[in-house]
Image (cartoon, helix red, strand yellow):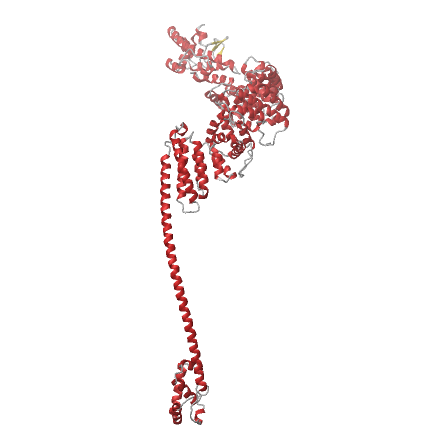
């Protein structure tokens, strides 16, 4: 290639003007900038002079005046610098086929033509590294030294839908702030189908695209693409001119334009033609769009010859609810695909409840489950069953018969899948909450399989844990009503029957140890009441299994004991029923037997304890000895009682115990202790002997106390006899004294009566033996005891004769005070009347009879 071509001077018959860099006819002055005619071979020299400040009007003359050596140097430098531009132009030409518009390479060359020549160092800084540049558009968009080239590469990347964030930002910036060809190219790039439908754009970008699209809608080569851009960003009614442009593009020759227009017009037939495109990305996008549209053509092709990748693409984009025929096509592909598209179909199925598929869809799913489900991984099969068994939230009613039959297909095949799965898969299924739904729906056949699984040494414990957690999980998942159970003995229901169905049958010994661990871990779980009731009913109805039941369900032993206490109030009967089967051993039952025992019942209970210890000492000598020690302490405490009614029976029991203990002690010492008694570190015989010694000492003290009490009773009786004799003698003396006092009282009464009679006789019959005088009957003190002088003298005379003064007073109704008053009154009367005094003296001196 010549230096002239390398310098970008010629373009066809035209040459570039060094003044304004436009292409003009050769050997003529530039009609644009009026620069004189300059030979093409001196174009580089002219550009150097122009850059150095030479006026363009003098440029032709100055260029012609240059020495040949100067021309050679200047032309060589320009050609070298233009060579770097040619490499940029080569990259631009490689990018331009990826763009819609053309002419970007020429614009790049024109831009550099305005700059050159420049200093070599500046050029190296602008274009470093010079070569070789990678062909990758992404590299050019991010690393190209030329900003124009970076922008063109960014356009190309965005057109292809794989631009980086920086590239998209650059294109967006040109869309919003660029002008002309660059802005239009940015618009076209950002609305390509490869950038998503609809594209992610800001409101400002959408408005800018609408304006740009309408501005170039009449440009023939851009019309259809502009219409596509307008349609992608607008939600308004499509104008007729935009619709017309889309139809022109739909019937055009450019496949890419036809595809874009078909997408905008929702032309299913045209888009379906892209399914056979040589570009896998176009075919994949066509499948995606047709899937979103629910295209029957696509579903027919999928059913006929679709593979797993095809089905996955359809599954990702299918609308909900899926169109008619979609389920049949997908399940058909699943049947002929390795792995059956299980994960994808599960996600697809969960978009709608099983009941929402209708009877036909449910039957299609059921047929698919019968063919595929048992061969899937166990956890996947369980997930499918959970989906099929879960009713819609807005329709929790029980399924109809057809729906139930379809769901049972999932149940049966899921059970087969779990049965065929590895131990790890089976354990994972048992721990999944979805397994609670399987337990809820399980029937007789499933219960048989559960019975077998529970006896598996590797996964059985996980199943037992799921069974114990089932009531709580069923409540928390809303499978059963959340009711408060206040009854002491509720109906075990399905969880209880399921647990007992697993327990039933041979191999129960394989369940005891894992069940014991599980029940102990989940002993406080809510909802366990129904399981406890199921175990209790089994305990009552199967006496032969009581030991295994108590060992397996040791965590619920206290609840079972409470039920036992309710149905059997007699502690002795409970002891005889439990001590042989209780896994906690004889001592625990001994403690319950002897706690708060009435003294009257103690001998019978102790006799039962000695018999149980005698039976147990051959296998558990230390446990038996510990229990006997407990009984001995209870007997010792009973002998401390002061209740004489029970002491004879307790003494008899002590005598029996003393006679029975030596042989028992010998058996304890001679029988080796098994490993089960490793936590009991001694035989407790010393404790028993200590209790026995204390009972003997207590018995001796009690006997001594009884002897002392008997002697004290004898002494008391003697003292009592003496006291009664003394009381008898005192009574006799008292009676004699009372008799004497009575006689004396009679005598006194007689004396009083005699004195009273004598006083009355004296006062009534005693008369003086002297002739009466009138003054004798003169009433001086009427209404008194002595109204006359004779009455007063008679009283004095009776007193002189020794009459009882008080009886005299009593007869006359006098008191010492009234007597004194009347005597004083008579004395004063006698002093006042001499004849009274003299007559009174006569009367006192006269005899009285």
Q: Nearer the viewer, residue 500 or 685?
A: 685
Q: Nearer the viewer, residue 443 or 14?
A: 443
Query: Split into 4 quadrants, where in the image is the N terminus?
Result: top left
Q: Position of residue 114 (x, y in %)?
A: 44, 15
Q: Position of residue 489 (x, y in %)?
A: 54, 37
In the displayed structure, would residue 121 be above or below residue 816?
above
Query: Split into 4 quadrants, where in the image is the C terminus?
Result: bottom left
In the displayed structure, would residue 768 be above or below residue 548?
below
Q: Position of residue 24 (x, y in %)?
A: 49, 11
Quadrant in which residue 675 is drawn: top left
Q: Nearer the viewer, residue 487 or 406?
A: 487
Total marks in image = 0
Q: Position of residue 720 (x, y in %)?
A: 38, 57
Q: Nearer the viewer, residue 452 or 182?
A: 452
Q: Note whether residue 350 is visible.
A: no
Quadrant in which residue 666 is drawn: top left
Q: Note whether residue 803 is visible.
A: yes
């Amino acid at each position: 290639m010549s230096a002239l071509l390398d310098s970008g001077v010629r373009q066809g018959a035209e040459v570039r003007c060094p003044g304004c860099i436009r292409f003009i006819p050769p050997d003529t002055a530039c009609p644009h900038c009026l620069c004189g005619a300059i030979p093409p071979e001196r174009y580089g020299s002219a550009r150097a002079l122009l850059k150095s400040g030479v006026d363009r009007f003098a440029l032709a003359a100055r260029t012609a005046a240059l020495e040949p050596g100067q021309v050679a140097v200047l032309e060589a430098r320009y050609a070298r610098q233009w060579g770097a531009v040619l490499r940029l132009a080569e990259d631009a030409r490689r990018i331009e086929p990826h763009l819609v518009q053309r002419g970007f390479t020429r614009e790049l060359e024109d831009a550099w033509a305005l700059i050159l020549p420049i200093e070599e160092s500046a050029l190296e800084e602008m274009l470093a590294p010079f070569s070789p540049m990678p062909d990758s558009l992404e590299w050019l968009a991010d690393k190209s030294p030329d900003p124009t080239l970076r922008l063109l590469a960014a356009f190309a990347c965005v057109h292809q839908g794989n631009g980086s964030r920086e590239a998209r930002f650059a294109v967006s910036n040109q869309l919003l702030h660029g002008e002309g060809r660059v802005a239009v190219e940015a618009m076209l790039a950002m609305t390509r189908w490869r950038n998503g439908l609809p594209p992610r754009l800001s409101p400002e970008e959408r408005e800018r695209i609408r304006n740009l699209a309408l501005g170039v809608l009449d440009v023939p080569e851009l019309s259809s693409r502009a219409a596509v851009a307008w349609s992608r960003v607008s939600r308004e009614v499509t104008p007729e001119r935009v619709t017309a442009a889309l139809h022109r593009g739909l019937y055009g020759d450019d496949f890419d334009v036809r595809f874009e227009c078909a997408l905008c017009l929702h032309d299913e037939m045209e888009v379906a033609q892209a399914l056979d495109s040589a570009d896998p990305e176009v075919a994949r996008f066509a499948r995606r769009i047709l899937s979103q549209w629910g295209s029957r053509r696509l579903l027919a092709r999928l059913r006929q010859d679709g593979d797993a990748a095809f089905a996955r693409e359809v599954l990702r984009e299918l609308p909900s609810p899926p169109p008619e025929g979609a389920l049949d096509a997908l399940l058909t592909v699943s049947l002929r695909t390795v792995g059956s598209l299980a994960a994808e179909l599960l996600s697809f199925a969960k978009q709608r409840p099983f009941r929402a598929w209708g009877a036909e869809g449910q039957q299609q799913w059921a047929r698919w489950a019968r063919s595929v489900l048992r061969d899937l991984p166990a956890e996947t099969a369980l997930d499918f069953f959970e989906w099929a068994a879960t009713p819609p939230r807005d329709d929790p009613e029980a399924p109809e018969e057809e729906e139930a039959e379809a769901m049972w297909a999932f149940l049966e095949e899921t059970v087969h899948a779990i049965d065929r799965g590895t131990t790890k898969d089976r354990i994972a299924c048992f721990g999944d909450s979805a397994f609670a739904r399987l337990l809820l729906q399980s029937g007789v056949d499933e219960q048989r399989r559960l019975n077998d699984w529970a006896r598996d040494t590797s996964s059985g414990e996980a199943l037992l844990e799921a069974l114990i957690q089932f009531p709580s999980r069923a409540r928390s998942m809303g499978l059963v009503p959340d009711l408060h159970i206040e009854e002491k003995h509720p109906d075990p229901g399905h969880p209880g029957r399921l647990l007992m169905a697993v327990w039933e049958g041979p191999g129960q010994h394989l369940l005891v140890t894992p069940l014991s661990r599980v029940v102990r871990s989940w002993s406080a779980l809510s909802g366990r009441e129904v399981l406890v009731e199921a175990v209790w009913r089994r305990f009552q109805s199967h006496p032969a299994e009581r030991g295994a039941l108590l060992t397996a369900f040791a965590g619920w032993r206290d609840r079972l004991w409470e039920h036992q206490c309710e149905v059997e109030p007699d502690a002795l009967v409970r002891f005889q029923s439990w001590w042989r089967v209780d896994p906690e051993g004889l001592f625990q039952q001994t403690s319950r037997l002897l706690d708060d025992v009435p003294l009257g019942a103690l001998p019978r209970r102790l006799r039962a304890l000695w018999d149980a210890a005698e039976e147990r000492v051959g296998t558990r000598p230390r446990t038996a000895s510990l229990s006997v020690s407990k009984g001995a302490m209870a007997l010792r405490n009973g002998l401390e009682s002061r209740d004489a009614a029970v002491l004879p029976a307790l003494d008899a029991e002590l005598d029996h115990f003393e006679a029975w203990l030596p042989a028992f002690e010998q058996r304890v010492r001679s029988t080796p202790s098994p490993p089960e008694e490793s936590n009991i570190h001694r035989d407790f015989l010393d404790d028993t002997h200590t209790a026995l010694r204390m009972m003997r000492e207590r018995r001796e003290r009690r006997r001594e106390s009884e002897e002392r009490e008997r002697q004290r009773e004898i002494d008391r009786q003697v003292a009592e006899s003496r006291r009664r004799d003394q009381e008898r003698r005192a009574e006799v003396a008292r009676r004699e004294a009372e008799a004497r006092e009575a006689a004396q009282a009679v005598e006194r009464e007689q004396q009083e009566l005699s004195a009273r009679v004598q006083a009355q006789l004296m006062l009534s019959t005693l008369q003086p033996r002297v002739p009466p005088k009138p003054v004798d009957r003169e009433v001086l003190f009427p209404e008194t005891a002595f109204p006359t002088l004779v009455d007063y003298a008679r009283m004095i005379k009776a007193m002189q004769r020794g009459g009882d003064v008080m009886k005299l007073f009593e007869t006359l109704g006098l008191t010492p005070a009234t007597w004194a008053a009347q005597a004083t009154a008579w004395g004063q009367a006698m002093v006042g009347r001499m004849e009274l005094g003299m007559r009174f003296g006569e009367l006192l001196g006269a005899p009285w009879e």
